[in-house]
Each structure stands twice: as C-alpha cells, then as structure tokens.
C-alpha cells in the first residue's frame, strides 16, 4: 500500500508588512481533493502539522473565491466528513518521514506564515530532495521550501523546475498588496526555474522527484499524476 505524509499548515493567519494579520489557513480544495483521491486509490494517509495543531480552513476557500457554489457545497460536505482527520493531526516533529512513499503539502496562505520558517519541515524537505524520493507541493505550499537548507547553507531546490501561485493570481487578492513577499518573486530570487500557466487554470511541473502545482485548480491534476506514477 502506498503511504502518504500530508503536511498541513497550522497557521490561522498571514502577517502582512503593516503588521496586520489576515485570517487564513489551509485552502479547502487543496486538502479535500487530493486527500479523497489518495484515499479512493487505496493509499494510507497521515496528516501532520507543526506542533500537532488543528489546521484552520481558510473561509475564503468556502466562498466565491473557492469556485462555483455547487463546488464549494461539495467541498464543505466532504470537510465535515473529514473533520475527525483534521482534528487529530500528528505532530510533525514526531513523524519518521522516511517511512512514507510520498510527502505532500497542500497550500493556502498558511504555509507563508509557518512552514516557510519551520525547521522541522525544512529538514524533511531537504532530506527528501537529497534522497530523490517523491515530494509534491501545491499552490502556496512551495513556500515551505524556503526553510530547507543544504549542509553548506545553500538552498537545495535552486535550479529545480517548479511552479506555484503566481504574482498575477496573488494580486487579485486586495490584501496581497500588503504582503512582505510574494511566492513567485521569492522562488525566482532563491534560484528556482519557475514557470506558470494561465491564471487559475491547472498547471503542474515535474522535475525528477519534485512535483508542484500552481493553484487550487491544479489539485485534481496533481493528485491524478501522483497516483498514476506511484499507485502501484
């Protein structure tokens, strides 16, 4: 059976450059769609967060920003069914990440707050990349890669082809104009070979064992790609 470590942000806000705290967390679709796809494929899934904190679902992801009403209605219903999973995450520091076939990070603005500076998560990502074992990050989740460092202090993801939430997509959100940094810009500054597709359309990139998806709309396509590659 394929095993998945799903690492979720434990943050409930994103601190902006003026000191205000924008309420956020995990984007619902980015958790629900891959989780259900992996579960229906017969995979065993462990959900973990920094400190074992119960993840917060970004309420914007359950409104008009989350898509058509029929879609958000379905996601809300699935979230309710998955409540026991969300309310009992394991502590990320207690996880033996090497024991999992795949490590998967959903997004939302939450990772910009906590996972981007989380040393435990950063060490998992750096080791995973060094081992060239399957690793996938969706939408804003590539922010978690900024906490990863090689032994010499360099960024191990430099030169890797990847995607993530684009500046154009980000600036649709009025609060993002007050952000201290944007994901696309910082990925490029760190040395990533960044690419993007059309705004709010599915776009995934694979470079060796690293898989990335650009936005919430990439959730299903990324999950399908991973199941096709590692479903055996």
Image: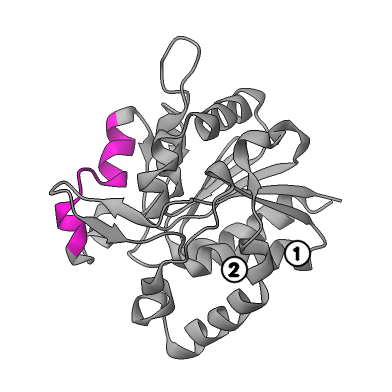
Main secondary structure along the magenta-highlighted residues: helix
Compared across the picture, whether 139 is left or right of 2 comes to left
Q: In this view, does 77 lie above or below 90?
A: below
| Image coordinates for residue 82, horizontal then vertical, percent | 66, 71
Query: Can you identify the residue that label 2 sits on?
Result: 32
Give the colouring mode of the picture: one colour
Range covered by the magenta-colored residues? 175-189
Q: Is residue 182 a member of the stretch shown in magenta?
A: yes
Q: How many marks?
A: 2
Query: In which quarter of the view is residue 99 placed?
Result: top right
Secondary structure of the residue carrying numbered label 1: helix
Residue 18's mark? none
| Image coordinates for residue 213, horizontal then vertical, percent | 48, 54
Query: In which quarter of the view is residue 123 placed?
Result: top right
Q: Which residue is drawn at 51% across and 69% down?
A: 29
Query: Can you identify the residue that label 1 sits on?
Result: 39
| Image coordinates for residue 26, horizontal then vertical, percent | 46, 60
| Image coordinates for residue 101, horizontal then vertical, percent | 75, 41
Residue closest to the eye, 227 or 151: 151
Query: Can the viewer see residue 58?
Result: yes
């Amino acid at each position: 059976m394929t095993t998945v470590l799903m690492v979720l942000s434990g943050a409930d806000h994103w601190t902006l450059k003026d000191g205000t705290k924008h309420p956020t967390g995990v984007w619902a679709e980015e958790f629900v769609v891959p989780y259900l796809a992996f579960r229906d494929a017969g995979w065993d899934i462990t959900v973990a967060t920094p400190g074992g904190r119960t993840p917060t679902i970004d309420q914007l992801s359950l409104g008009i920003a989350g898509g058509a009403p029929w879609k958000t209605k379905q996601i809300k219903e699935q979230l309710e069914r998955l409540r026991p999973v969300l309310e009992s995450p394991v502590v990320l520091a207690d996880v033996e990440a090497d024991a999992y076939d795949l490590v998967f990070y959903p997004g939302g603005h939450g990772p910009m707050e906590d996972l981007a500076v989380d040393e435990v998560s950063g060490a998992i990502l750096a080791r995973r990349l060094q081992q060239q074992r399957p690793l996938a990050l969706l939408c804003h989740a590539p922010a978690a890669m900024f906490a990863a460092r090689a032994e010499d202090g360099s960024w191990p993801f430099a030169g890797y082809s990847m995607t993530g939430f684009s500046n154009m997509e980000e600036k649709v959100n009025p609060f993002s104009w007050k952000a201290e940094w944007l994901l696309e810009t910082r990925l490029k500054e760190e040395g990533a070979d960044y690419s993007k597709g059309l705004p709010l359309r599915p776009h995934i990139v694979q470079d060796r064992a690293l898989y990335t998806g650009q936005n919430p709309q990439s959730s299903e396509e990324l999950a399908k790609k991973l199941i096709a590659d590692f479903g055996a």
